[in-house]
């Protein structure tokens, strides 16, 4: 995952590189480093932990130099300490890397056999050592980089700086994203356009198999065989002025939870024609005669996709094949021609989701991307982009992106139903009416339940394990509740289809494992109540999240009952997502974890 940035400049770069890293911290935050060339000498500062540690190091020992590269790390090979932090040095070569060099062990052993001494446990160091060995063998920097690229396998975005040539940065891409930024007198390199936004809005994206020689005046881009290639220079929409602050909130996650009514309004404005009470025509994918839709994504985005399976099947009578992208990409799914595929990703850069997309493209399917970042690789490789318009999501735990993804997917399912003639205009009008209610209902819910969720979180924080149950579209919401709780509070949590309880998880039920039941008063309610009875009969503690009709229809004793307004089944997932987000958030705050940057995680997962 990791973020990388580079500047070939005309004025000092260290501070600017660290500022750019701040915009990439969502990609990893376990250590960071910066290297520059000054007076013909490579030098670096590195620090374990968050970027402020690197800033403190630089404040004490500043780095001069007008060219440099920098890195914020999410550890793959080697613990997150200073020795493993990038940039890695070898014989006048500095390297920063995002990805995994898969044949590093073999190369490392060869280099050690010929006398190399390694200073880190990382896979990346072989890149620096290999280039420096090539230099020693008499190659020029350009030839040494090219020979290295021919030797390494795996996934990488690389930036390489030579002590002997401070006016050039070499870059290469095989997998993780890399953008070149064009300035007037300087040139830039970064993992994304957002990192480069304070410097320039003119960017060109490298594609897999590209490498580039970047100087102050331009970039020469080639394929790995050395043939020149043209990559379109485009105007980036990433803004240097995006205010990345928490407003009056303690954490980005809290801010993003409360932004949901507004975010959903934007999303609805894009997809709904309010004058006609219908979903606007969908450009790029014609659902009319499709045999099926394949959906793939990871984490929370996958759970949005799983929720939408119920909608596509119900409203559009369209069969959905869905799997987590890390399985989908290798399963050899027999894809039916005349199908479409949807890939859901907040970042648009998730490696497994991108690989699944490419698998479907090879099979000739029409590709749709449900993304937040419109300039992302997934968006750029799709036939149709369905933006979720959630605005920047900084907290690693996804909240507003999830409900915005659900809103887009519900809109697409309704549009598909219209195209396929499986819902009437009246039904579409009614569904659109329910969608349009969401911002108002969300605001009311957030205001109403906050104090109760805070109190409940205090109780929940005493437990080590939590089970979430739900049926129908509440099943993916149960899984999302468990994912949210575990990733930020570190409490072990699992989400299950309520009907699966008696097929195993019921063995775990006792007074030490609260069971959070997501049970709106829908067509599954009675069945879910039976499952709650089974939990109660075994001394389990129930936290019931229901609506007014549901609360009136059961008198089972609970540890707590959270009551939401009655809403149509079509929007229950978006509304019931709110209490599970708040519960996870307040539990994590109460436990004192790093809510926005939980341990071991990163916002953008660009390695598989
Ligand atoms: O950027 P993406 O939506 O592709 O990311 C997918 C997952 O990594 C992401 O949803 C992850 O599960 C979140 N941390 C969950 O809160």
Image (cartoon, grey):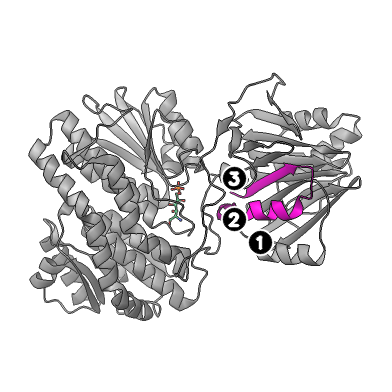
Q: Tell me where residue 446 appears, x and y as whole percent.
A: 29, 67
Query: Badge 1, how many Cα within 10 Å: few under 14, some, many 20+?
Result: many
Query: Badge 3, how many Cα within 10 Å: few under 14, some, many 20+?
Result: many
Which mark is first along the chain, 1 or 3? 1
> What is the magenta range?
1-27
Write down the quadrant of residue 257 in the picture.
bottom left
Question: Residue at label 3?
Answer: 197
Label pair 3/1, CB-CB below 8 angstroms = no
Closer to the camera in the image, 364 or 77:
364
Q: Tell me where residue 564 appears, x and y as whole percent.
A: 20, 67
Q: Secondary structure at mark 3?
A: loop
Tell me the CA gap for discs 3 and 1.
19 Å
Question: Residue at label 1?
Answer: 51
Which mark is first along the chain, 1 or 2? 2
Q: Is residue 386 left or right of residue 70?
A: left
Closer to the camera in the image, 126 or 499:
126
Label pair 2/1, CB-CB below 8 angstroms = yes
Is residue 574 covered in magenta?
no
């Amino acid at each position: 995952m990791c973020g990388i940035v580079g500047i070939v400049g005309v004025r000092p770069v260290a501070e600017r590189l660290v500022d750019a890293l701040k915009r990439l911290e969502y990609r990893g935050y376990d250590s960071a480093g910066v290297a520059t060339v000054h007076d013909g000498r490579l030098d670096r500062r590195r620090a374990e932990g968050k970027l402020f540690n690197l800033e403190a190091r630089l404040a004490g020992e500043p780095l001069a130099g007008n060219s440099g590269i920098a890195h914020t790390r999410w550890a793959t090979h080697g613990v997150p300490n200073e020795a493993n932090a990038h940039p890695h040095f070898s014989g006048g070569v500095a390297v920063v890397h995002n990805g995994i060099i898969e044949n590093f062990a073999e190369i490392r052993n060869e280099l050690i056999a010929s006398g190399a001494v390694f200073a880190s446990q990382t896979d990346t160091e072989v890149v620096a050592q290999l280039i420096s060995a090539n230099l020693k063998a008499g190659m020029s920097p350009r030839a040494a980089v090219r020979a290295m690229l021919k030797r390494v396998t795996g996934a990488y975005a690389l930036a390489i700086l030579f002590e002997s040539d401070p006016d050039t940065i070499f870059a290469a891409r095989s997998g993780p994203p890399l953008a070149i930024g064009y300035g007037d007198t300087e040139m830039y390199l970064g993992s994304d356009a957002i990192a480069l936004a304070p410097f320039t809005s003119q960017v060109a994206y490298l594609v897999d198999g590209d490498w580039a020689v970047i100087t102050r005046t331009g970039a020469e881009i080639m394929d790995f065989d050395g043939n020149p290639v043209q990559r379109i220079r485009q105007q980036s929409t990433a803004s240097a002025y995006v205010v990345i602050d928490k407003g009056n909130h303690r954490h980005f996650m809290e801010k993003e939870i409360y932004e949901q009514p507004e975010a959903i309004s934007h999303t609805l404005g894009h997809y709904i024609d309010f004058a006609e009470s219908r979903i606007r025509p969908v450009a790029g994918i014609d659902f009319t005669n499709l045999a099926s839709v394949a959906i793939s994504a990871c984490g929370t985005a996958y759970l949005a996709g799983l929720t939408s399976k119920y909608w596509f099947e119900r409203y559009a009578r369209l069969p959905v094949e869905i799997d987590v992208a890390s399985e989908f990409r290798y399963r050899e799914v027999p894809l039916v021609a005349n199908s479409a595929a949807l890939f859901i990703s907040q970042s648009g850069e998730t490696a497994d989701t991108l690989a699944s997309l490419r698998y479907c493209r090879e099979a000739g399917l029409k590709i749709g991307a449900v993304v937040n970042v419109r300039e992302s690789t997934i968006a750029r490789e799709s036939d149709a982009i369905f933006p979720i318009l959630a605005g920047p999501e900084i907290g690693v735990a996804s909240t507003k992106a999830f409900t915005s993804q659900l809103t887009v997917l519900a809109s697409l399912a309704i549009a598909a139903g219209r195209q396929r003639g499986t819902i009437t205009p009246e039904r579409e009008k009614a569904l659109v009416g329910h969608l349009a209610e969401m911002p108002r209902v969300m605001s009311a819910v957030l205001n109403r339940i906050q104090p109760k969720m805070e109190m409940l979180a205090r109780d929940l924080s005493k437990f080590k394990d939590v089970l979430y149950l739900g049926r129908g579209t509440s099943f993916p919401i149960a899984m999302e509740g468990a994912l949210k709780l575990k990733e930020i509070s570190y409490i072990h949590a699992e989400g299950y289809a309520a009907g699966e309880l008696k097929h195993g998880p019921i063995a775990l039920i006792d007074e030490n494992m609260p069971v959070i039941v997501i049970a709106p008063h829908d067509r599954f309610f009675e069945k879910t109540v039976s499952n709650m009875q089974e939990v109660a009969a075994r001394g389990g503690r129930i936290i019931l999240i229901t609506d007014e009709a549901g609360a009136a229809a059961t008198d089972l004793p609970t540890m707590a009952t959270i009551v939401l307004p009655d809403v149509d089944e079509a929007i229950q997932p978006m509304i019931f997502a709110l209490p599970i987000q708040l519960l996870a958030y307040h539990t994590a705050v109460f436990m004192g974890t790093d809510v926005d940057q939980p341990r071991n995680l990163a916002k953008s997962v660009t390695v598989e």
